[in-house]
């Protein structure tokens, strides 16, 4: 069975490439379960509620010029305008598209290591696969 390689996977935020990405993790998508079981039902009955789209974490090497840092990955107080993200797996053989808002940006600098950063994005839409 052939597996999908992560080699040459890219991510864009509002059509701007997020450079030097080392890891992408998307998860936590779920639906609220609404229990509508009555006392006369023999089995539990449920309706599905609102979608909780989940979160995405992007780990990347911090750019040498922070003045050019992608503002789509920086949290902004009161931000309600979602950014359009596209992950192009394996050079575009599979795409995941969704909207989200940056909620966290962390920067780390270790002795004798590259400066790295991690951004957390709250997804505001369902993922569309193409």
Image (cartoon, rainbow, N blue to C red):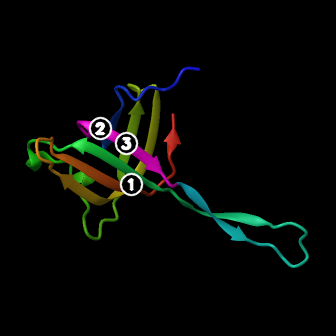
Q: Is residue 32 above or below residue 129?
A: below
**Is label 2 in contact with label 3 (beta carbons under 8 Å)?**
no
Residue 114 is situated, as x and y percent measured from the top left of the image, at 15, 41
Residue at x 69% of width, y 69% of height: 34
Q: CA distance from mark 1 to mark 2?
A: 20 Å
Which residue in the protein does label 1 denote? 100
Q: Is residue 19 above or below residue 75?
A: above
Residue 3 is situated, as x and y percent measured from the top left of the image, at 52, 24
Magenta region includes residue 22: yes
Which residue in the protein does label 2 denote? 22
For the record, the magenta segment spans 17-28
Residue at x 17% of width, y 44% of height: 62
Lower sequence index among marks 1 and 3: 3
Residue reaching furthest to the bottom: 39
Which residue in the protein does label 3 denote? 24
**Magenta region, mostly helix, strand or loop?**
strand
38 relative to 82 in the view: left or right? right
Q: Characterize the local packing of mark 2: few (<14), some (14-19) or many (20 or more) Cα atoms within 10 angstroms.
A: few
Residue 78 is situated, as x and y percent measured from the top left of the image, at 29, 70
Residue 33 is situated, as x and y percent measured from the top left of the image, at 66, 66
48 relative to 94 in the view: left or right? right
Q: CA distance from mark 2 to mark 3?
A: 7 Å
Determine the image quadrant of residue 112: top left
Determine the image quadrant of residue 48: bottom right
Depth order, front residue of 22/11: 22
59 relative to 87 in the view: left or right? left
Depth order, front residue of 116/70: 116
């Amino acid at each position: 069975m052939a597996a999908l390689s992560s080699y040459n996977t890219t991510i864009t935020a509002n059509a701007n490439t997020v450079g030097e990405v080392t890891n992408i993790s998307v998860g936590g998508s779920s639906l609220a379960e609404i229990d509508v079981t009555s006392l006369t039902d023999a089995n539990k009955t449920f309706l599905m509620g609102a979608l909780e789209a989940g979160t995405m974490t992007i780990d990347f090497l911090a750019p040498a010029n922070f003045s050019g840092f992608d503002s789509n990955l920086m949290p902004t107080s009161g931000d309600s305008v979602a950014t359009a993200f596209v992950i192009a797996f394996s050079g575009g053989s599979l795409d995941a598209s969704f909207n989200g808002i940056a909620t966290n940006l962390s920067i780390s600098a270790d002795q004798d290591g590259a400066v790295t950063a991690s951004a957390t994005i709250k997804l505001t839409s369902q993922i569309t696969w193409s």
